[in-house]
Amino acid sequence: MDNGEYLNLFIGHKIPQEFAYSVLGAETFSDYALTVASGSSSYVPIETEESQILNQFIEQIKAEKSGAAMSPVRVFIDGD
């Protein structure tokens, strides 16, 4: 979601464990949730083949929206 200042990435607790590991770099959603401050942490991409799909999606959104190229990506986790 783009609010004009940030791109907001919402991550729900029902993500598959494989997604948590290969895209977020955590064993589980709970592990990932412990590493971020929801609403104020930036999304930090990891270097895996699987995470490149999400990274490319984010970059495409930025490319299509004028002024969004420099918009930081904030992470929100389920429960906020």
Image (cartoon, rainbow, N blue to C red):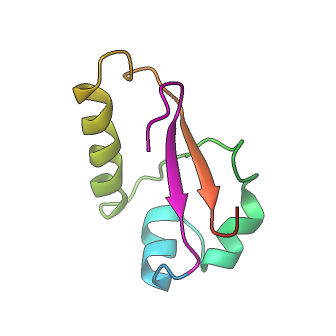
Q: Looking at the image, which residue sits at the far top?
A: 67
Q: Position of residue 45 (x, y in %)?
A: 48, 48
Compared with 24, 60 (above or below) is: above
Asked whether, in this view, residue 25 is left or right of residue 33, the answer is left
As drawn, 52 above or below 68: below
Q: Quadrant of the C terminus?
A: bottom right
- The magenta-colored residue range is 1-13
Reply yes or no: does residue 5 show up in magenta. yes
- Front-lying residue, 10 or 44: 10
**How many numbered markers are drawn?**
0
Location of residue 65 with respect to 30 vertically, above or below: above
Frontmost residue, 2 versus 47: 2
User: Looking at the image, which is closer to me, 77 or 22?
Assistant: 77
The structure residue drawn at horizontal position 59% and vertical position 78%, both measured from the top left corner, is 13
Q: Is residue 60 magenta?
A: no
Measuring from the top left, give residue 73's x and y in whole percent: 52, 38
- Left or right: where 67 falls relative to 71: left
Taking the spot 69% from the left edge, 77% from the top edge, the residue there is: 30
Residue at 74% in and 60% down: 35
Please name the predominant secondary structure of the magenta segment in the image. Answer: loop
Q: Is residue 2 left or right of residue 56?
A: right
The residue located at (43%, 74%) in the rendering is 19
Residue that protrudes farthest toward the front in the picture: 3
Camera-nearest residue between 30 and 76: 76
Residue 40, how many percent across, how many down? 72, 42
Name the quadrant of the N terminus: top left
